[in-house]
Image: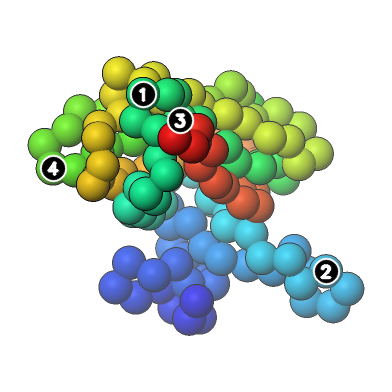
């Protein structure tokens, strides 16, 4: 990522409502994470992917992520949107509340009825609910699916 967000790429100096890509710290721990600033109107992040050839479109899909709060005041949910192809409706939902400063795994399940046959793909976005005191650290995210 560049130091300044550009063209939809997350930068390290996001504005007050934008997520930014930062390291845990500069010296001993260079793990990257995405930070959602403490704000009432956070803008989300999104990515798009194609379904692999072994994707079982008759089984549920789980969107997982590892997150932690920077403090103990706010406990927001994260809206995980899941859209397939063009013109789809949101098949996602809210995560459990992100609580505490310990990195924790959260999951949102996409029902099998909302998974289309290949070739296909999906766009996933993360939009945190209001958290005006503590920022949210997002450490990683992934999708789990059943193989054919």
Label 2: element kind = loop
The numbered mark, 4 or 3, whose residue comes first in the sequence reads 3
How far apart marks 4 and 3 lie (CA) works out to 19 Å
Q: Residues within 10 Å of mark 3 (few under 14, many from 20)?
A: many
Name the mark on residue 92.
Answer: none
Name the mark on residue 29.
Answer: 2
Q: Residue at x 44, y 67 (%)?
A: 10
Q: Position of residue 11 (x, y in %)?
A: 48, 72
Quarter location, residue 85: top left
The numbered mark, 4 or 1, whose residue comes first in the sequence reads 1
Q: Residue at x 58, y 22 (%)?
A: 96
Q: Nearer the viewer, mark 4 or mark 3?
A: 3
Q: Tell whether 116 sits left or right of 82.
A: left
Name the mark on residue 86.
Answer: 4
Q: Residues within 10 Å of mark 2 (few under 14, many from 20)?
A: few
The residue at which mark 1 appears reads as 58
Relative height, residue 82 to residue 44 (above, below): above
Name the mark on residue 61.
Answer: 3
The numbered mark, 1 or 2, whose residue comes first in the sequence reads 2
Give the residue furthest to the left.
87
Label 1: element kind = loop
């Amino acid at each position: 990522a560049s130091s300044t967000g550009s063209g939809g790429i997350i930068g390290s100096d996001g504005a007050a409502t934008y997520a930014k890509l930062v390291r845990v710290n500069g010296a001993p721990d260079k793990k990257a994470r995405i930070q959602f600033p403490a704000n009432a109107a956070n803008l989300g992040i999104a990515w798009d992917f194609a379904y692999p050839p072994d994707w079982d479109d008759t089984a549920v899909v789980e969107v997982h992520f590892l997150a932690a709060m920077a403090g103990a005041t706010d406990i927001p949910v994260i809206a995980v949107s899941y859209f397939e192809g063009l013109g789809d409706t949101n098949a996602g939902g809210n995560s459990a509340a992100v609580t505490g400063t310990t990195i924790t795994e959260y999951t949102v399940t996409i029902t099998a009825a909302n998974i289309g046959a290949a070739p296909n793909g999906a766009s996933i976005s993360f939009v945190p609910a209001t958290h005006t005191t503590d920022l949210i650290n997002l450490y990683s995210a992934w999708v789990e699916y059943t193989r054919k």
